[in-house]
Image (cartoon, helix red, strand yellow):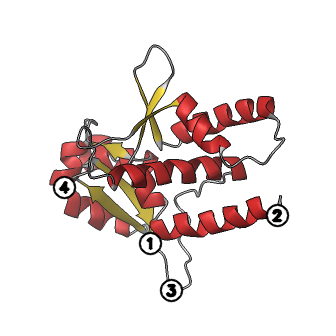
Amino acid sequence: MKKLEEVRENYSQAIVKLLKGTVDKESEVWEDILFYQTEIQDYIQTIGLELVVRKEEGFAFVKQLEDEQGNTLGLVRRLSMGFENSVVLVVLRQLLEDFDNNPTDFQSFEKIISHSEIKEEVSLFLQEGYNKVKFSKDIDKCIKDIEDWGFLKRVNSKEDTRYQIHRIIKQKITLDILEEFKQKLSGYVGTI
């Protein structure tokens, strides 16, 4: 039987981190991902994955390759999210898009938003008479889920919890998906 030392490559730890989720530039394997990008891609493509590196935005991840019918090998688990989580994600994606398209704001590359601001933005999509107590509990759970999935990164704050909207959201929720969901949401709100 072989030992780990005999089969380990210089980029092995980077691949393991990538298979677990998004890797940020602060990670100890970031430089390995940049240096061994070709080797990592060659390795993971044999299992139906593609390496996506957004050096300028400071993150990397793997996504599944699809055949002509949109099928994958099924290695990476697709997130199953409810309607509420979808609404929060779309709101966050739109906020990041608005932030990026605002040429007067040169202070930061990252969009920071507070917990209460997220609640306020999402509450705009609630119908009249919606149970505010239930909403408060539900939205807290949604924000926690979205943070666990890596779309929000908690920023140190003593008062109202603040988050950075992770730029991976732009890769996962494209402008086409954003527009499609906004149309569906508009139809949903119109039926209430």
Q: Using the image, tell me which numbered label, if any, was put on residue 191.
A: 2
Residue 92: which numbered mark, if any?
none
Q: Nearer the viewer, residue 30 or 55?
A: 55
First along the sequence among labels 2 and 4: 4
Residue at point 50%, 86% (across, down): 68
Mark 2 or 4: in front is 2
CB within 8 Å, label 2 to label 4:
no
Kind of residue at disc 4: Tyr
Label 1 and label 2: CA atoms lie apart by: 37 Å
Q: Quadrant of residue 30?
A: top left
Label 3 to label 1: alpha-carbon separation: 10 Å
Residue hosting label 3: 68
Q: Position of residue 179 (x, y in %)?
A: 54, 68
Secondary element at tag 1? loop
Q: Distance of mark 4 from mark 3, alpha carbons?
A: 29 Å
> Label 4 neighbourhood size at 10 Å, few (<14), some (14-19), many (20+)?
some
Residue 78, by quadrant, is bottom right
Residue that mark 1 sits on: 65
Classify mark 3: residues with Cα within 10 Å, few (<14), some (14-19) or many (20+).
few
Image point (73%, 46%), residue name: 126
Position of 60 relative to 133 (above/below) = below
The residue lying at 73 percent from left, 67 percent from top is: 187
- Whole-number angstrom distance, CA of label 1 to CA of label 4: 20 Å
Work out which residue is located at the far top of the displayed protein and give it. 158
Q: Residues within 10 Å of mark 2 (few under 14, many from 20)?
A: few
Q: Element type at marker 3?
A: loop
Q: Name the residue under label 4.
A: 36
Q: Residue 146 location, x and y as percent?
A: 56, 41
Tell me the mark number nearer the camera, choosing from 1 and 4. Answer: 1
Q: In which quarter of the image is the C terminus?
A: bottom right
